[in-house]
Amino acid sequence: MSPLDLLVAVPLALMIAAVLLGSRGRLLLLAAIPVMAGLTVWLLLLPEGTAHIVGDWNLPLGILLRADGVAQLLVAATSACASIIGLYALREFAPGPSGSETAHGYAFWPLFYLLWGGANAGFLTTDLFNLYVALEMVSLAAVAMAAMGSLRAALQYFVVALVGSLAYLLGVALLFANYATVDITLLAGTARPDLATKVALAVMTAGLLIKAAVFPLHGWLPPAHAAAPAPASALLSAIVVKVGFVILLRLWFEAFPAIVAPAALDVLGWLGALAVLYGSIQAIRQETLKALVAYSTVAQIGYLLLAFPLVVTAAGSDRAWAGMTIHAIAHMLAKAAMFLAAGLMLKAVNGHRLEDLSGLVRVMPLTVAAFGLAAISLMGLPPSAGFIAKFLLLEAALEQGAVFQAAILLVGGLMAAVYLFNPLSRTFAGRDTPVTEAKDTLQTAAPLALGLLAVSLGFAGQAMVDISAGVSQAGPPAAAVGEVP
Amino acid sequence: MTLADYLFPALLYIGVFFYAAGSLGLLRFQDAELRLHALTKADNVGLGFVALAAALHWGSVAVAFKIAAVWLFALMAAGATAQLMARRAKTAAERGTDR
Amino acid sequence: MPTLMHLYPLTGAALVGLGLYGIVTLRHPLRQLLAVNVVGAGIFLILGGLGRGTASTDPFPQALVITGIVVAVALTAFGAALVVRVAEEERARDDTAAVEATGDSA
Amino acid sequence: MNSLLPLLLVSLTIVPALISFALPDRLAVWRDAINIGFALSKLALVGALLLAAREGTITEWRYEFLPGHEFILRPDSLSLLFVTLSAFLWLITTVYAIAYFKRGPHLGRFFGFFNLCVLSATGVAISGTAITFFLFYELLTLATWPLVVHKGDEKSLRAGRIYLIYTLAGSAAFLAGIVWLKSLVGTIEFTAPPDLTGIPRLELTLIFILCIGGLGVKAALIPFHVWLPEAMAAPAPVSALLHAVAVVKAGAFGILRMIYDVYGIDTVSELGLGTPLALWAGATILYGSFRAVMQTDIKKRLAYSTVSQVSYIILGASLIGPFAIIGGLVHLVHQGIMKITLFMCAGALDNRMGIKLVADLDGAGRAMPVTMAAFSIGALGMIGIPPTAGFISKWYLGMGGLQSEASWVIAVLAGSSLLNALYFLPLLYRAWLLPPSKELAPVRELDGAWNRMLVLPAAVTALITLAAGAFATFPFSPLRWAELIAESGYLK
Amino acid sequence: MTLAFDLILCLMIVGTAAAALLTHNALAAIVFFIVFGNLLGLAWLAMNAVNVAMAEIAIGAGITGVLLILTRQRLMALGDDLVSAETPGWLRAGAVLACTGLTALVGSAVLSVAPADDLGGPIAALLPELGIENPVTGVLLAFRAYDTLLETFVLLGALVAVWSLAPGNAWPRPPASLNLAESGGGSVAQAFGRLLLPLALVMAAYLVWAGSDFPGGAFQAGTVLAGGLIIAAIGGAVAWPRADNSILRAVLVLGPGVFLIIGLAGIALGRFLFYPPGFAKAMIVAIEYSLALSIGATLALLLAGRSVAPDHRS
C-alpha cells in the first residue's frame, strides 16, 4: 500500500469516470482534490528514496517506482497546480445555458486527468520505457488541449512532439540492446562510455530538449501555449515542460553520472543561458499578453538548464540541485497563476493586446494582484520561492566562480522585470472603454491562491531544500533486483 | 527423393507462373475490367497451387484445412473487391472523372 | 563485428534515416505522418532485431515493440484527425474570404 | 534570546495593510481610524523597545529560512534611531494623507501599499543580517512602485518605469555583492562583523563598490539619482514620507550598515575607500543643490535638495571620525523632519491653492500664514541657520571634516549652504514680501477638521525642527541619541 | 531463414519505404506504405517474433493503412490535393547530409552492440508461475503490466482527443458514415460486411484465448475486431453510435477499467498490479478479453473520426 502507484491510478480512475459521465461529471473534481492532496501529503512523509516494484517481479523485468526529493516536490507542486487549475476550468468549460455540452467541455476532463496521471507517472518511475509511455500520455493530452485554441499551432506542436518522442525511443532501444535493462538504477551501476551509450544519450537528450522546449528547439511552444484556452495553457506551461526536464535530469545525473563529460554539461549550460536571453528578448518584443507569458516560459526553462554545470562540481552542488528543483516548482506555480490571471483579464476586455489591459487594476484588483504576485516570483524578487531558487543558484554559481552564470541569473531577472512590469504598469493607466466584469469568485480566487502559494513558499525555503536534498542513492534498493543470468 | 519431394517444388513453380501471368496481365491490358479480370483469376489460381504445396509440405490434415480456409477467404475478398472496383470504374467512366 | 544478426537492425537504422529525411523534406502533414510511422518501424526493428540470440528471440523487446506500435497507431490516428480538421478550418477560412472578396453571399 | 517583540514590530503593520485593501471606499472612516490607531500602537511598541534598549537588553528574533542563512530581526541602537523616526513620521503622514485625499477613489489600495512601505522600512531598519536587509530593501521597491503610479496618468507611469529601472538594477548589483561576500565569508551578521582578513583586497573593493552602488541608487547618489525628481509625479503624501524619508533613508541606512557593521571603519579606511566615497557624496551635494536652483517647480526643487541632503549622511559616514559620524547620524533624523515639513507644506499649498510653480508663491504668506511659517522654518533649517536642527548637523559635519583633516569638506558644506540659500530664500521672499499676483481670498486654513488635519502636521514637524536645534543638548534630543550610538557602537 | 531471403527482404523493405516517401502521388505513397507494413511483418516472422509480426501487419499495415486512405479521401473532399510543396534545394541537400550522418551514427552504434537474447531465460523461468506459455503475453500483461495499463489509457486518451476536435455544433453526433450503400456500393459490400463481422468476432475470441499459450493476444484480437467493424460499417451492417451513447462509453472504458480494478485489487494483497499466485492466468485472460473488446471499439472509432455536423459532405 503506497502512494507511489495510487498517485497514478487515482487520476486514471477519474479519467474513466470522466469519459463515462462526460461534463456532467466535472464536479467529480471536488472529490478528486482532497484524495490527491492526501496522497501527496503521504508521499511527502515517505522517508527518502523509498521505492517499490510494481506487481511482484524484480528488476530487470519489473518496473521500479521511487520517490526521491525531486519527485516528491514536483508531484506536490503538480497536485497543487492541477487542483487549482481544475477549479478554474470548472467555470471555463461549464456547459452552455441550455445545458448543451460542447466537445471541448466533454473532452477537457478526461484529458486533464490523463495529463495529471501521466505527469505523476513521469515523476515517480525510474524505468525509461515507462517514462516514454508517460511522456506520450502527457504530450497527447497537451496537443489535444492546445488544439482547443489554435489547430494549426497544435498540428505543428504535434509533429515536433512526435519527433521528440521518436528520438527518445531510439535512445531507449539502443540502451536496452546494450545493457539488457531500461531501469535507471541498474544502468547507473553498469554504465560504460561506449559508442552505443553515447549515441543513445545524445539522441535522447535531443528528444527531451524538444519536449522541454529548450532554445533552439522551442519554436512550437509560444504559438501553442498562447492560443490555448487559459487553463490549458496553464497546464501546458506549468506541468508538461517539467516532465521532459525531470527525465533529462534523471538521465544525466542518475543514470549516467560517470560518463557525462563536463564539456557536455557546459554545452547544456550555454543552451540554458541562450534560452534565458532569447526568451526574455522575445518576451519583451511581444504585443499580445499570452505570447509574452509563453516566451517567458522559454526563458524560465533556460534557468533550469543553466544550473546543470553547477550541480556537478563539488562546491555548492547540493545548493545548486536544491535551487534547480525549487526553481522548477516556483515556475510551475507562478506560471500557472499568471496564465490564469491573464486569461481572466483578456476575457474581461475580450482583447489580446497589452494595450487592452489599461485600467484593469481599478476593475479587477484581485486578478491584477495575482498577476503581480506571480510576476514577483518569476522575477525572483523576495519574498517569493523564485527568489529562494535564484538566491541558491546565484550562491552556488559564485561559490564555483561561475561568474558568467551569475551574470545571466541577474540579467535574466532584470529582463523579466522589464517584460513583466510592462503589462502591470499598463493596468494602472487610465481607461476609457467600459469593461464587462464577469464577477466569478472561483475563477478570481484560483490565480490568487496560486500566486500566494508561490510567494508564501518563499518562507518555506528550509523545508524545500531538505526535501529536494533527498537525492536517490545510486543503484536500486537491494530487494528489487532479481537474479540476472 | 520421394514423390512429395518432386511434387512440392513443381507445384510451387506452377503457382509462381500463374502469379507472373496475373502481373503481366495487369501491366499489358488497357482498361480496368480486363486488368481486374487478369488479376483476380490468375493470382487466385496461383495462390491455390501455393496453398496446395504448403498443405503437402506440412502434411497434417488440420493444417491443410486451415490453409484451405485461408485460400477461401482470399477468394472471397478478391471477388468482392473486384466487383466493387469494377462498379466504381464503370460509374467513373460515365462521369469522366478518374476518382 | 557485424554478424548476420545485424542485418535487420541495420535496415532499422536505414529506415530511421530515411524517415527523418521524409519528415524534414515533406511539407504536407499527412506525408509527414507517414514518414513518422516509417521512423517508428525502423526503431522497432532496431529494438527487436538486437534482441535475437543464436537460438531464441528475447520476448522482452517484443512486448516493448507491441506497446510501441499501439501507442504509435493511437497518435497517428489523432494526427490524421488533426490534419483533416486543420484542412477543414483552412477551407472554411478560404470560403469566408471568397465570400468577402466577391462581396455577395455565395 | 528569541523574543517576538521585533517580529511583532514588523508584522504589526500587515493588519492595517490588509484591512485597507479589503475595506470598500464607503467605509473610509473606519479605514482612517484603523490606520491612525495602528500608527499610534506602533509608536507605543517602539517606545517599549526603546526602554528595553535603554536597560541594555537587546531583543532579537531568529528564523533559519535557508541552510546556512538566518533571518534575524535585531533592533540595535542604530536601527532604533531609524525606526523611531519612521514610526513617528508615519503617524504624521497618515493624518496628512487622510486630509490630503479627503474621500478620493481607490484609497484602499493607496493606504494598503502605504502600510506595506512602512512595514518594509521598519524591516530594513531592524534587520540583523544582509539577507534580511536585502529582502526588506526589495520589498520596499515593490511596495512603493504602486504608490508612484497611483494616479495612473502618463507622467506617473513614466516615473514608475524609471523608478523600477534604477531601483531593480541597483538591487541586482547589491544582491550580487552580498552573495559574493557570503560565499567568501559565511553569514554576514551586522552584530558580529565578519573578519575580512583572509580575503584579497581586490575582491573586497569590488564587493564594496557593488554594494554601495546598489544602495547608492536608493540613496540618490549621482548619477543614480534621476528617479527621485521623476518620482515627484506621485501624490504629495507619497513624496513626503517615501521619497523624502523612507526610501531615500533606506539607501543611506544601508550604506551606514555596510560601512559600520559589515566592513567596519578600520577596514574601510585601510582599503582607502573612505575618501572616494566622501568625494562622491560631496559631488552629489553640490550637484543636487546646483540643479535645485534651476528648478521652477517647487516639488522638483525639493526633490533635488533631498538628493544633496542625503549625501550629507553619506559624507558623515565616510569621513572616519567621531564628529563626522555623529553629524551623519543626527542629520539622518534632522533631514527627515525638515524635508517632510517642506513637502507637506508644498502639498498643502498645491492641494488648497493649486500653487505648483515657484512663480505662483507671491503673497502665499498672507493666504496660508501657518503653512508658510512652517515652510519657512523648514527652509531655514535646510540652509542651516541656527537655532534650527539643520545647523547642528552641518556644524558637526564641519567639525568632523576638520578632525579628519579633510578641509575640502568645509568648502563643500559652505558652498551647499550658499546654494541652499539661493534656492530657498527667493521662495520665502515671494511668499512673505511680494503682493499676491491675483486676488487670493484668505484660505482660513485652520477652521474645519480637514484644514486642520492638513496644516497641523507640518506645523508640528516645524516645531520639532526648532526644538531639535534649540534643545540639542537635552537628554532626549536626537543629537544626544546619535552620540550615544556613536560611542557604544562604533568608536570602540 | 536463409541469408538470401533476409537480404532480399531488407532491400525490398527499404525500397518500398523510399518509394512511399518520395513519390508525388499520395495514393501511391499510401499503397507503398501498406506494402512496406506487410514486408515488415515478414521481417518479424523471419526473426521468429510471431506476436510482433501479427501486430505489425494488423496495426502497422492494416489499421494505419486504412486510416491514411480514409484521411486522404477526406482531404480530397476538402480540396486539398496532398501534393507537398517543393522544399528548397539547400534544405533537401542539408537533409540528405544530416540523415545519412544520423543513419551512419545509429548504424555504427547498432553494429557495436552484440545482439543477444538477454532476458529470454529469466522470463522463461517465471512463466510457469503465471500459468501461461506465451512469453510475450507474460511480459505484456504481467512483468510490464504497468506499461500496458498506461498504454491502454493512451489509446483511450487518443479517442477522446479525436472527439475533442469536433466543431461546436457537431458534438455529440456520430462520425461520418462510411456506408458505401449510400454512394452506390450496392449489395455486394453489404453481404460481404454482414458475413465478415461474425467471423471477425470468432477470430478475435480465438486470438485472445490462444494468446496465453500461442502467438496472439489482446492487441492483435482487438485489431481484427476493429477490422471487422470497419468492413461492417462500409457494408452498412453497422452504423456509428452517437458519442454520448452510454453503452458505447461503457465498452470503450471496459478494458482499461477492468485492468485498473484488477491492479487496485492487487494492492489489497500487497502491491499494485499484483496477481495472486494461483489466479495469474485467470486474471490475465479476464484482462485480455475486456481489453480486446475495448481496443476493437476504440480503433474502429479512431478510424471513423470525430462527430460531424448534419450538413457535412465527404
Image: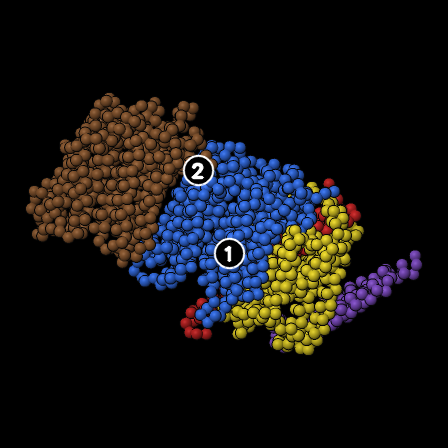
Chain colours: A blue, B purple, C red, D brown, E yellow
Is residue D283 at least partly visible in the picture? no
Residue E108 or residue A364, whichever sits in front: A364
Q: Amino acid at mark 1?
A: Ile
Q: Chain of mark 1?
A: A
Quadrant, the N terminus of chain D: top left
Camera-nearest residue between A408 and A455: A455
Count residues near mark 1 (Cα–Cα under 10 Å), then give few for <14, some for 14-19, many for 20+: some
Asked whether residue D193 appears in the rendered view, the answer is yes
Whole-number angstrom distance, CA of label 1 to CA of label 2: 32 Å
Name the chain under label 2: D
Residue beneath disc 2:
D64
Label 2 neighbourhood size at 10 Å, few (<14), some (14-19), many (20+)?
some
Q: Residue at x 60, y 39 (%)?
A: A473
Residue C5 spot, x, y in % from top left: 74, 47
Q: Is residue E249 left or right of residue A223?
A: right
Answer above or below: position of D87 versus C16.
Answer: above
Instruction: Kindly identify which residue carries mark 1.
Output: A33
Closest to the observer: D451 or E85? D451
Pinpoint residue A139: horizontal percent, then vertical percent.
Answer: 55, 54
Please report the residue visible at 76 percent of the width from the left and 61 percent of the height from the top.
Answer: E210
Residues tagged 1 and 2 counted as in contact (Cβ below 8 A): no
Q: In what element is the residue under mark 1?
A: helix
Secondary structure found at label 2? strand
Describe residue A341's horizontal placement relative to residue D156 as left or right. right
- Percent coordinates x, y for residue A285 in the rendering: 40, 50
Q: What residue lies at 34% left-to-right and 32% top-to-bottom?
A: D58
Q: In the image shown, does E253 or A198 lie closer to the viewer?
A: E253
In what quadrant of the picture does the C terminus of chain D appear?
top left
Total number of numbered labels?
A: 2
Q: Give the image location of residue A147, x and y in percent.
A: 51, 60
Q: Is residue E206 left or right of residue D435?
A: right
- Which amino acid type is shown beneath numbered disc 2? Glu
